């Protein structure tokens, strides 16, 4: 089979290449899945660079989420049938024509959910849903999030609306503002404009922002902290800038603010099966009803993975870049 392979850690445009690999055989309790689509997540590229919390042994096939069809089942698998379309996340080696997963991990899908949505239904949406629950916010509360034009930002908006929670969206540049406004997210601020802080206060009518989610790090974290109300919480969710947190100690001290991290993989690992089933069921239900739609900006074949990675990190992107077996 063909697979995207890295022989060393490094910049995705330099180390991602397609190669022939043996088609894997499912063991006990496992299934083999024929790839339909696999998204490129920020954490996938962090793994490729060798800067994530998990480093696979090399050579490695990247990819942690996908939608596909069951191609074969291993011994002991009785509740999953060949031909079923499933979503799966929290796996390895999904950027290949075929990959393995534990049968207990896969989520069968109704036909009403498109492949574009199904490919990215679990990883980021589940993290966003768990994050939102961990924020401990109620109907009418205000939260803020930067890099809001990304997948997590858009998901937080959709899920927050279901709960009546208000979201202030911080982005950089007019193209990102336009993209979010086109999707119906009205509370959008361009932090590259001189009066963005005043604009934020105007959009929220001066209401306290009690939680802020930072996906950028660097100066972006300080911008969010400046918006926080006293006793608010700043949650570090990512570091798109590649820079350490830069925050004003005055804001931290005098607001009595709390800064903490959130790692979706660890949160899921520490979540009970019944709770995970409830959360995933909520996402599948929202997607089946059309309330949660996850678009794809461009599809690349496995052979173009390096080009796809570059597209995934381009500014102004408004939807996911995904890989397919063939372009």
Image (tube, helix red, strand yellow):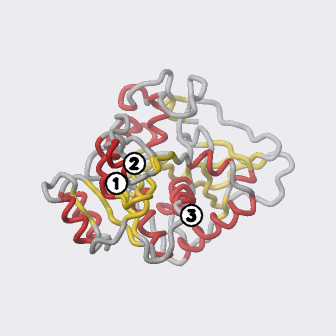
Q: Position of residue 300 (x, y in %)?
A: 39, 46
Marks 1/2 in contact by CB < 8 Å: the verdict is: yes
Report the Cα–Cα distance between label 1 and label 2.
Answer: 6 Å
Labels 1 and 2: the sequence-earlier one: 1
Q: Position of residue 73 (x, y in %)?
A: 77, 49
Q: Which residue is mark 2?
A: 215
- The quarter holding residue 177 reads bottom left
Q: Which mark is residue 146?
A: 1
Instruction: Report the front residue among 285 and 231.
Output: 231
Task: Residue at 43% x, 72% y: name it.
Answer: 141
Q: Which mark is residue 6?
A: none
Left/right of residue 34 with respect to residue 19 in the rendered view: right
Q: Which residue is mark 3?
A: 133
Left/right of residue 35 with respect to residue 275 in the rendered view: left
Task: Residue at 45% x, 68% y: name it.
Answer: 293
> Measured along the vertical axis of the image, is residue 128 above or below residue 75?
below
> Measured along the vertical axis of the image, is residue 181 above or below residue 76?
below
């Amino acid at each position: 089979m063909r697979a995207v392979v890295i022989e060393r850690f490094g910049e995705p445009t330099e180390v991602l290449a397609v190669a022939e690999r043996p088609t894997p055989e499912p063991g006990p309790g496992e299934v083999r899945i024929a790839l339909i689509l696999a998204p490129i997540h920020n954490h996938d590229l962090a793994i490729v660079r060798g800067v994530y919390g998990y480093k696979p042994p090399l050579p490695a096939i990247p990819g942690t989420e996908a939608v596909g069809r069951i191609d074969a089942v291993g011994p002991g698998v009785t509740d999953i049938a060949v031909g079923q379309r499933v979503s799966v996340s929290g796996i390895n080696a999904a950027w290949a024509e075929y990959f393995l997963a534990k049968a207990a991990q896969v989520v069968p899908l109704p036909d009403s959910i498109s492949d574009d949505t199904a490919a990215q239904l679990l990883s980021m949406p589940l993290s966003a849903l768990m994050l939102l629950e961990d924020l401990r916010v109620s109907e009418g509360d205000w939260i803020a999030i930067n890099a809001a034009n990304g997948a997590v930002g858009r998901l937080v908006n959709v899920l927050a609306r279901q709960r009546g929670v208000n979201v202030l969206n911080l982005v950089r540049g007019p193209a990102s503002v336009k993209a979010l406004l086109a999707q119906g997210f009205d509370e959008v601020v361009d932090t590259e404009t001189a009066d963005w802080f005043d604009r934020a206060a105007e959009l929220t009518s001066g209401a306290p922002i009690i939680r802020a989610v930072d996906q950028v790090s660097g100066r972006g974290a300080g911008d969010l902290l400046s918006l926080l109300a006293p006793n608010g919480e700043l949650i570090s969710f990512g570091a798109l800038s590649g820079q350490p947190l830069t925050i004003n100690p005055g804001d931290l001290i005098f607001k009595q603010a709390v800064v903490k991290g959130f790692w979706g993989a660890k949160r899921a690992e520490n979540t009970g099966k019944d709770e995970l089933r409830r959360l995933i069921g909520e996402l599948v239900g929202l997607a089946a009803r059309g309330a949660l739609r996850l678009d794809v900006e461009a599809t690349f074949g496995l052979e173009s993975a390096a080009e796809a990675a570059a597209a995934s990190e381009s500014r102004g992107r408004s939807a996911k870049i995904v890989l397919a077996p063939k372009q």
